[in-house]
Amino acid sequence: MNWNVPNILTALRLLAAPGVAVMFLYFHRPWADWFALVLFISAAATDWFDGYLARAWKQTTKLGAMLDPIADKAMVVIALMVIVGYSSMSPWLVLPATVILFREVFVSGLREFLGDTAGTLKVTQLAKWKTTAQMIAIAVLFAQGVFEHYFGATTRGAVVLGHAGLWLLWIAAALTLLTGYDYFRKSIPYLKD
């Protein structure tokens, strides 16, 4: 295994994913919200840096290519689980979160099933935008939790953040559906007996 800087950043992002949930186990709100927000944003930033550094320094590896999407999915899935768990279970939040979770599991299963032919499911530019949209939406929803605890859930800022977070999550869910369909369409020739 090649533990260069990009791979270390990816591994740290993978380890940070469960850390977001752990914040809510060991800290009371609003501290849990603050720590989760800072940890999530810091880890999300490494998603850009690890890829940039791997390309700039010509340090792309199979390990990094394998860990990067796992770290992204772990971050998104765990953060959404926490956000939904601490929400009022509004269908406006649960539905896009469910779409995102389903697609992430579905595409991971496709890649595992296809094995060596999974190269047909290479990450597209739209999938990168999808991940970015997911991470921004989640960060805004965590920020809403911070804002609510300091200023109240009914203040204008909390309401605006809540609506912005939901809209961003719906946009992320739409991109998630599009990329999931694209990957499924590309895999159809390999699914025939």
Image: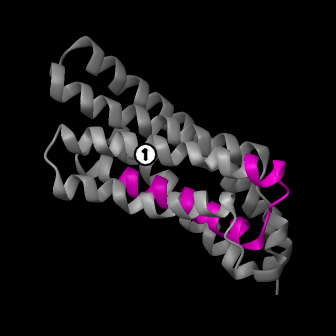
Q: Nearer the viewer, residue 60 or 175?
A: 60
Give x and y (percent) for residue 57: 82, 53
Which secondary structure dominates the residues rendered in magenta? Answer: helix
Which quadrant holds the N terminus? bottom right
Give the residue number, with chain letter if any, for mark 1: 40
- Please determine whether, in this image, residue 148 is positioned above or below residue 12: above
| Callout 1 amino acid | Phe
- Please determine whether, in this image, residue 72 is positioned above or below residue 39: below
Give x and y (percent) for residue 191: 78, 78
Tell me which corner region of the image, top left, top right, bottom left or bottom right, holds residue 162: top left
Give x and y (percent) for residue 145: 26, 34
The residue under the point 43% across, 58% down is: 16
Judge whether residue 153 can be spotted in this image: no
Residue 76 in magenta? Answer: yes
Q: Nearer the viewer, residue 67 or 96?
A: 67
Give x and y (percent) for residue 94: 36, 47
The residue under the point 78% across, 44% down is: 125
- Please determine whether, in this image, residue 159 is positioned above or below residue 59: above
Circle 1 SS class: helix
- Residue bounds of the magenta highlight: 52-81
| Left or right side of 116 for 167 | left
